[in-house]
Image (cartoon, rainbow, N blue to C red):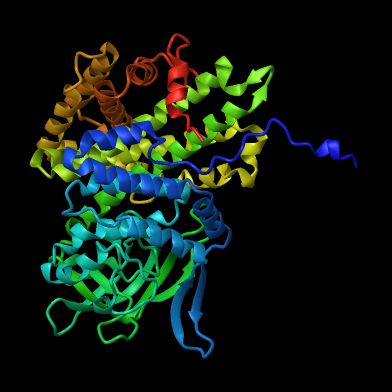
Amino acid sequence: MAASTHTVTNQAPPLVGYDVFTSDLALTEAVGRHLAPDLLEEAREDLALLGRASGSAQVREWGEQANAHPPRLRTHDRYGHRIDEVEFHPAWHRLLGRSVSAGLTHAWGRPGGHVRRAAGFLVASQAEAGHGCPVSMTHAAVPALRAEPELAAVWEPAALSHVYERALRPVAEKPGVLLGMAMTEKQGGSDVRTNTTEARPLAADGEYVLTGHKWFCSAPMSDAFLVLAQAPAGLTCFLVPRVLADGSRNAFAIQRLKDKLGNRSNASAEVEFDGTTWARRVGEEGRGLRTIMGMVAATRLDCALGSAALMRQAVAQAVHHASYRSAFGGPLVEKPLMRNVLADLAVESEAATVLAMRLAAAYDAGTPEESALLRIAVPAAKYWVTKRCVPVVAEALECLGGNGYVEESGMPRLLRESPLNSVWEGSGNVQALDVVRALRTEPAALDALLREVGAARGADHRLDRAIRRVLVELADLEGVEARARRLTERIALVLQGALLVRWAPAEVADAFCAARLGGDGGAAFGTLPHTLDLRALVERARVDV
């Protein structure tokens, strides 16, 4: 066969060897906006270091390897002893080590810690999303642990550590630990009040043994887990370590690993507690939901951040491909219709990033007003941003044509991952009902929302009209459960619109308000008004390599 038939032309080079952080203008601007000036230089240096690693060919290869070689369950050793261990490809450990050393489990009590950590989580997740699960769980467990100061004194410093050590040993012997969570059961799912796992008190105060089965256990090779179980006074939160203080293994039987649509690098398991599983109570008996909700809220924000990361990576790949690929007489990126598609995707990606980073800043502020905003804005953001992820990634894949449907492009892995964050930590209905609950029971949450969107009123007539429509919806909560999704969507959209009007370039805010709030856009991407500055939107999303 003639060699000339194998000459390769008109193919985009791989998008590697770039800084994931500094090339993301929406993210770098958010960090500059929300961090105190005295923290900025160090934070930017750290994030750029992580960004260069996350965009490197080596770390991208680690992500491919970790997904191509998913974890394996080993229930017994060669001699027949029960060990219940999960084996991971070395690439998984390298990814985890890099993220832990970058401080992605260290936010609580650190100046600007939540903004710095959120930006890093968004960057690292673009290289490989699955390893974000144990990182997220460990970070989010801290507020729950603080309900039991004696426990927090032991476990919190290890959880905040920048050292990753994979070996299972007692916490006192480890420089750093990872934490997981096991809440849902097969008969109840999100309805954790129906949990049947039983906690029987022992003679020592705060110590129990557990009997039961957990349908989903996140990151089963972690050093300890927060678990909900029924104690004599009702549903209670417990800490279940994998290794006890004397070095012996706790009774923690991993029954099987889940065979998931995506998130293949990460292990999710079913686990059994056999009546001898030792646990330490966290918080008061019967107050388990209240104790663990701080963890749930933090992981919900990470779901929004993770989806924002997937969107950003998908859009970057699509713009990169269209910049190099020629068709019908010129570069794809110069074709008016393709430019419209890319611009529309870029607007959605930026809106997700800006909202998620604003909520991270609210955690850092820690004021009653900002905490009230989080109460309503976190479930609204989790609901909307995670739901927008699937169509964004699917449309970005289509921008690559048949190349995007091939595994080697990396786009199928992004697409398989894209529904995950909408399902985990409470699916869409749970989030929408949580928004309604906040509206009904916490007046401060509504006040905080109105203050936040009110800061942008008068700047764009389409945003003003959208805010008025939300106010009309809020004036009558009769039958609100059936329309909770519509209300939550509108709250998320006016939040995004208000933030973009205040902080984004005029062309970004104009496009968002026209298409998302003003009705001048279609159901599919690529339907922005042609009068907008579409070229500027695409250029803003482009990665230079």
- Could you say where residue 260 lies in the image, as x and y percent from the top left? 51, 56
When asked about the image quadrant of residue 403, the answer is top right
Vertical placement of residue 185 versus 479, above or below: below
Between 311 and 31, the one lying in front of the other is 31
**Viewport quadrant of the N terminus:** top right
Question: Which residue is most to the top?
Answer: 531
When asked about the image quadrant of residue 291, the answer is bottom left
Between 387 and 248, the one lying in front of the other is 248
* Residue drawn where x is 44% and y is 81% of the image: 83
* Residue drawn where x is 13% and y is 67% of the image: 148
Between 359 and 53, the one lying in front of the other is 53
- Could you say where residue 461 lies in the image, as x and y percent from the top left? 26, 11
The image shows a total of numbered marks equal to: 0
- Could you say where residue 295 lies in the image, as x and y percent from the top left? 24, 55
Residue 303 relative to residue 7: left or right: left
Residue 455 relative to residue 311: left or right: left
* Residue drawn where x is 49% and y is 18% of the image: 527
Residue 313 relative to residue 172: left or right: right
Vertical placement of residue 5 versus 284, above or below: above
Q: Is residue 141 visible?
A: yes
Question: Which residue is most to the bottom?
Answer: 79
Q: Is residue 188 visible?
A: no
- Could you say where residue 226 lies in the image, as x and y percent from the top left? 27, 65
Residue 97 relative to residue 3: left or right: left
Question: Which residue is most to the right?
Answer: 1
